Image (cartoon, rainbow, N blue to C red):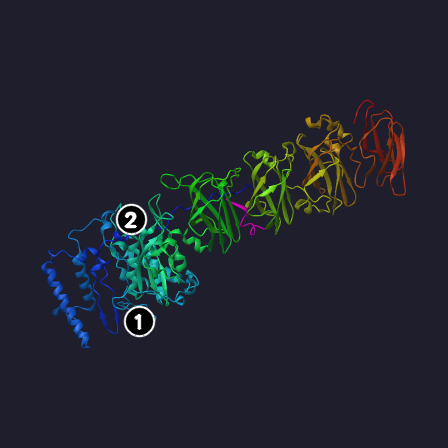
Amino acid sequence: MADIMVHKFSFPLTCPPCHAQPNQQPITEENQHPGNQRQESGSVTLRPKDPKDNPKQANPEPNKKPTHNDKQSQEECKRTIKAYMISEKEGGAPSKPRPADSVFSHKTVFEKWESLQYEEQRPSTKRQLSAESAAKCVSVRKRSSVTSSREEPAKPLSPTDPGRQPGKACLPISSSSQRKPRRQLFSSTGVFHKVDTLAISAGRELKEQGVFSAQSIARAITQGAINELEKLRAIWVWLCHNIEYDVEGYLGLSPKLCTPEEVIKQGRGVCSGFSSICLEMCREVGVQCEEVSGYSKGIGHSPGRKLAQDRSDHSWNVVWVKDRWGLLDACWGAGTVNMETKTFVKRFDDFYFLTDPSEFINSHFPDEQHWQLLDTPISLEKFELGPLKTSAFYTLGLTLQQPTQYKITTEDGEATVSVTSSRPLTFAYELRQRDVQTGVPGQREVDSSCGLLSVTRQGMSLRLLPPDPGDYELKLFAQAEGDSGALRWVCSLELECPAVRQSQPLPANPYMSWGSGARAGALGVKGCSLPNEEPLEVGEGGECEVILHTARPLMVVCELAHALLDPALAKRCLALQIAAERLVCNVLCPYKGFYRLSMFVRDYSDGSGTLQNVGNFLLHCKSQGVNLNQLYPPDLGPWCGPGMRTDAAGLSQFSHPGALVNVPQGRCNITFHRTSPELQIHAVLSTEMSQKSQVKSGPGQGLNSETSHKDKASSKQDNSTTELHQEALFPLSRYILLTLTDSKVTVSVSASSPGVYRLGLYGRMPPQQEFSPLCDYVLRSMCEKRGDPFPCVYSAWGKGCVLLEPRSGLLAPQSWVRVRVKVPAARKVSVLAEERVELKMNKSKVWEGEAYTGSIRQIKLTAATSEAGDMAVLMTFDVLDLESEP
């Protein structure tokens, strides 16, 4: 039998990075934007930095004065700006700057102005940015790119353009028609393959050349872009592939990198580094971009934490592209952080490129409500209470039906989580109890027996039964059906259990899900007789039946688990029937409690294929169960009842289509038809205590004993009796009789005593020497009366021979016995008793007559095929002694 392949999943435990606190962003020339600027109809409007933006500069020290060089630079810059503005007012244009006249260009004016603002607030000594000192730095909450470029002039603002009025904040358009879903902007991110490839390869070349300027890189990676969307895509992909999250800087283990050039050169930075570089690059290529600060559910996030008590901890970007605002986070798109190893895990995530606002709001809450980009903005409280969903939750098409908040509270010790999916998925879960003192989830995972995971092609349902009162962390994992590798973390929830339910323990389930598996259909299973979610209640007799309906022939192997059931005993609790369109598993439950029945299949014709799990079913036995003495025989094969093997042999029209046959009177006849009369049939009867049956070849066409029959071969069979049948006078081979006609086969069985028997059917087609197993039947006799054996049959008893009377092979002494038998082609038939009796053939071609047993020990039935031929022994009957009892 093929091995069952069981895969142990390893789950990623990293979280999306939450980033530097806003008050940890250092003051640099690059991140101190000179103000909101707008170029319109050739005019320039300057808005100096408001001192209110920096509380430390609202009331500068009166004794602090700029140096002589600072004064000269201020006066020079002011004169230039004044001359420029007068020229604009008079309708003229400033003359072309000349170095000899110390005239500044338009760009130089802005750079000088920015430099002056920076010099006024530059500390006298350079700081080393540790975790403590960085907290004293000023954070710029939101900045906007200026749509200008040295190579591509900014376009005039249209009525729908989101440009700012001087000195006013840039607000998103509120019309829902402007918020097109991401799928309306592009069918899939695959359309950017050429853009992505160019951005990655160009970024690699620029790094080798030592180019670390955001502006130069932006121009190089967007050379092949044909519109703003492709420019934005190139910038975002470059950021995700060239900048890593600065874990050490975030933890204060190393100085934070502040300027975009430093971040690009070192290839690492915190969230503000990503968002500021994105802003600078968008500015360079003429894409309207904003920096947005707010709260996130990343590093250090704990469900239900009151975020209003903290300052916002993350920054990302919004961009105006294709007449709509879009959300993007290159920091989260670059990868995740493993806080156990304190390392960054590079993992490109396309989800955070122009994410739909309704999905982005799950993990990003902006300080300014309008940047939610939702028709109905949510409150911070609702954001705090929302379950944590990762990007994989949305990319896999999941919807959390129950619960709607992050915390679940058990009722009567039980809670339910349900998720729907847009396609078939594989699910798993992880439950860890939180430490009472620290609230940190424990290292040891709660046993899988505390949850009932049912998976369908439309989603999953998880019933949780925590083993102890307390708080738990629940993580859900999923992956597309058929995908290999570890499942992806999709959602986290909190479980609160005030009190546990007193119930019987569930069996461990290493295959995670209960019910039919999500891949059962793909593996050929059309349906199951059991419900997916509820356990099957086993009847008073302790037995049940599980049926899988199949779309094609399948091979099946089953596994039964219970806390008290050892593997050897578990095998004797299962009887499998493998048919072309269904698989039947008959189950015996010897103990009270819950059982796990796992079923594995492969294609029937693929003998080397791997068995795959298609279902794990929960069975509940409330009664004492079946008696251990009534389990199935230990030598039972995997082909019980009529099925694939009997079909292949040409057998049909079985009188008993199931694998189990109850024999209330101690006797039964099992009939079937064969398409080829050349097929030889052999039958074996055995019980638990009988010696192991062995199938050997025999000289006749029909054999019904465990060994070959020769003249008086049954004399050696008397030694095959066992302890269970010591009171019996005959071997089990005498309790089975085979009758074969042209097409019909009758297997007659007489139970020697109450118990469970295995009836094995075998067949062979000449010139085959060995018999092959066809199927097994399980016979259960409840009759207390010991059955009589059949006559001992010899090789001459062949096709067409039918015993009508007497059917018992044990005759009373000194009594008359009527004998009726059919023997085809026989010229004479006689009974050798105390006197020889010649039988006569009647009109029905039945040989009949009466014989007296007398005091002899054995009577023989003989026949000859010619008048002068020798008489061959067909069968013998045993005569009891006068003092013996049957």
- What residue does disc 1 label? 157
| Of residues 738 and 615, the one drawn nearer to the viewer in this rendering | 615
Magenta residues, start to end: 512-525
First of labels 1, 2 by sequence position: 1
| Of residues 206 and 724, the one drawn nearer to the viewer in this rendering | 724
Residue 1 versus residue 150 in the image, above or below? above
Cα separation, mark 1 vs mark 2, equals: 39 Å
State the residue at coordinates (86%, 37%): 820
Asked whether 457 falls inside the magenta stretch, the response is: no
CB atoms at circles 1 and 2 under 8 Å apart?
no
- What residue does disc 2 label? 250
Quadrant the C terminus occupies = top right
Question: In screen coordinates, is 326 left or right of 694?
Answer: left
Question: Which quarter of the picture shows residue 657?
Answer: top right
| Of residues 279 and 239, the one drawn nearer to the viewer in this rendering | 279
Question: In screen coordinates, is 410 left or right of 843?
Answer: left
Q: Can you name the residue that lies furthest to the top here? A: 883
- Which mark is on residue 274? none
Question: Which amino acid type is marked by label 1?
Answer: Leu
| SS majority, magenta | loop
Question: Which amino acid type is marked by label 2?
Answer: Tyr
